[in-house]
């Protein structure tokens, strides 16, 4: 018998059609688990019991928030696999860092392998199960302390954005696993804290599989803890605006 869902970690439907189910995942809930414990996959099955088959086509780390996409049929799963291979499945993440890249935009192309010291972690460089990885970045806003980044993964490796950011000297705010600071001191002496990795999947651009043509554009504003950290670092924009 699996553990009961944590009602404080609400999962809601952002989009559903004949082919796709897109959910809003909160921080603190894993996408999948090796047992019958509470996770986004289990919540998806509860929210969409009539789906022919639910297949997660994207996965977020437990502490990362944002959009998670499920194919509702085998045909939809294959269509999204092809879209990813052809570069037609776009994802935009937003992230906070205290040490932004000097360049306004660019790409991180370091290969990713298993960390030889801890198989649960990943490193940039050669090693066991080394795989090509590419992430594009834009410094969307330079803050009083750090920056708001837009991150666009072009591959889907484990911990990819977090590891690439670390290797680029821009570890994400709150990412204890990959060297990110968890505290910053504002000019007025206030301490800004991050209790989790400040990374959020904010937007998707993917084929409209149900219609057989066109694109779906979906967005999700970041949760309150991300907004609070952003404002504490000097941000003044309205993060509910997906642009």
Image: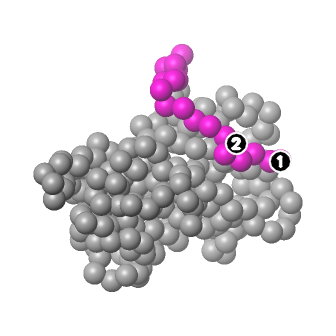
Percent x, y for residue 195? Answer: 29, 42
Percent x, y for residue 235? Answer: 35, 61
As displayed, is residue 126 above or below residue 7?
below
Front one among 29 and 241: 241
Is 75 covered by the magenta stretch?
no
Q: Which residue is mark 2?
A: 54
Q: Is residue 144 left or right of residue 222?
A: left
* Disc 2 secondary structure class: loop
Q: Is residue 123 left or right of residue 184?
A: right
Front one among 242 and 211: 242
Q: Which residues are magenta?
A: 1-18
Q: Is residue 21 left or right of residue 173?
A: right
Percent x, y for residue 35? Answer: 49, 29
Identify which residue is drawn at 55% across, 59% down: 241
* Disc 1 secondary structure class: loop
Circle 2 packing at 10 Å, graded few (<14), some (14-19), many (20+), is many
Image-quadrant location for residue 114: bottom left
Q: Which residue is mark 1?
A: 18
């Amino acid at each position: 018998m699996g553990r009961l869902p944590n009602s404080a970690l609400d999962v809601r439907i952002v989009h559903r059609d004949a082919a796709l189910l897109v959910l809003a995942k909160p921080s603190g809930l894993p996408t999948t688990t090796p047992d019958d414990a509470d996770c986004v996959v289990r919540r998806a099955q509860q929210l969409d019991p009539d789906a022919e088959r639910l297949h997660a086509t994207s996965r977020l780390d437990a502490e990362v928030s944002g959009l998670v996409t499920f194919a509702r049929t085998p045909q939809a799963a294959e269509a999204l696999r092809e879209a990813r291979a052809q570069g037609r499945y776009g994802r935009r993440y937003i992230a906070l860092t205290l040490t932004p890249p000097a360049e306004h935009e660019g790409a991180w192309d370091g290969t990713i392998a298993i960390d030889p010291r801890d198989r649960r972690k990943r490193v940039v460089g050669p090693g066991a199960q080394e795989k090509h990885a590419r992430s594009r970045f834009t410094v969307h806003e330079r803050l009083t302390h750090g920056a708001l980044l837009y991150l666009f993964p072009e591959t889907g490796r484990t911990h990819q954005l977090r590891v690439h950011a670390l290797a680029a000297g821009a570890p994400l705010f709150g990412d204890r696993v990959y060297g990110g600071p968890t505290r910053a001191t504002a000019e007025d002496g206030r301490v800004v804290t991050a209790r989790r990795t400040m990374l959020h999947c904010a937007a998707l651009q993917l084929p409209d599989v149900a219609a057989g043509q066109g694109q779906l554009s979906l967005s999700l504003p970041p949760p309150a803890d991300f907004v609070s950290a952003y404002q504490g670092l000097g941000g003044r924009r309205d993060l509910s605006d997906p642009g």
